[in-house]
């Protein structure tokens, strides 16, 4: 499979993880306005500072993306199955969203490293459009009984990690 298809499926996985996290926020108990505000702040911090933070730890965007996806997988599982108080669930959810924002930002960095600069604009649009179309199932899966939503999120994270591992360096 060529790198363009890996990027297409990587976009699919990360955008679905993002929307799945958004729909999972409805499962958290508490003030909905506060949860939405904290969701936005955590996502913005993930986008603005997450990449810089992970680049201090790892050297390339692909490895940073894999680290971010492992943390997303761990946080999602721990939120669902850990014995946590409401405040702890909210804090872990915000960490989850922080790394979703980070992964969302890193997807563009990875694409910029892998794609011919002359074709980067159209490649971003095609990959992003494909990812957006596939998010139609996220609300349905998020409303299913456990363990199906957790299995779906775990599958997406593991699938994206395997895609990142199979990509050749730029």
Image (cartoon, rainbow, N blue to C red):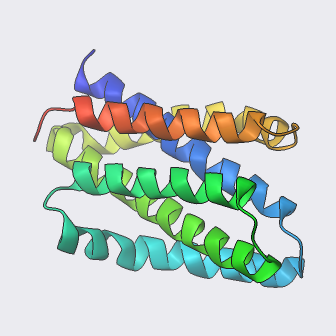
- Nearer-the-camera pick, 76 or 112: 76
Q: What residue is shown at x 66% (from left), y 69% (from top)?
A: 93
Between 21 and 76, the one nearer to me in the picture: 76
Q: Is residue 146 left or right of residue 107?
A: right
For the point 53% across and 50% down, which residue is it?
73
Q: Give the quadrant of residue 57.
A: bottom left
Looking at the image, which residue sits at the far left? 170
| Above or below, 17 relative to 59 | above
Indicate the position of residue 67 as horizontal and vertical percent values: 34, 55
Q: Residue furthest top?
A: 1
Q: Residue at x 24, y 28 (%)?
A: 166
Q: Quadrant of the N terminus?
A: top left
Q: Position of residue 17 (x, y in %)?
A: 58, 47
How far from the left and from the top, in percent, is residue 55? 21, 69
* Quadrant in which residue 165 is drawn: top left
Residue 149 pos. (x, y %): 74, 39
Say if residue 129 shows up in the picture. Answer: no
Residue 155 in the image: above or below residue 120: above
């Amino acid at each position: 499979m060529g790198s363009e298809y890996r990027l297409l499926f990587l976009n699919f996985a990360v955008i679905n993880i993002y929307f799945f996290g958004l729909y999972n926020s409805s499962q958290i108990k508490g003030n909905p306005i506060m949860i939405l505000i904290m969701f936005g702040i955590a996502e913005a911090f993930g986008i603005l500072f997450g990449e810089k933070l992970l680049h201090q730890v790892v050297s390339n965007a692909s490895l940073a993306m894999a680290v971010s996806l492992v943390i997303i997988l761990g946080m999602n599982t721990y939120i669902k199955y850990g014995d946590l108080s409401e405040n702890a669930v909210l804090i872990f959810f915000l960490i989850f969203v922080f790394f979703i924002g980070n992964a969302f930002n890193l997807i563009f960095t990875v694409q910029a490293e892998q794609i011919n600069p002359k074709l980067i604009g159209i490649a971003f649009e095609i990959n992003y459009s494909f990812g957006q179309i596939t998010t139609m199932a996220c609300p349905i899966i998020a409303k299913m009984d456990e363990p199906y939503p957790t299995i779906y999120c775990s599958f997406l994270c593991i699938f994206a990690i395997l895609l990142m591992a199979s990509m050749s360096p730029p």
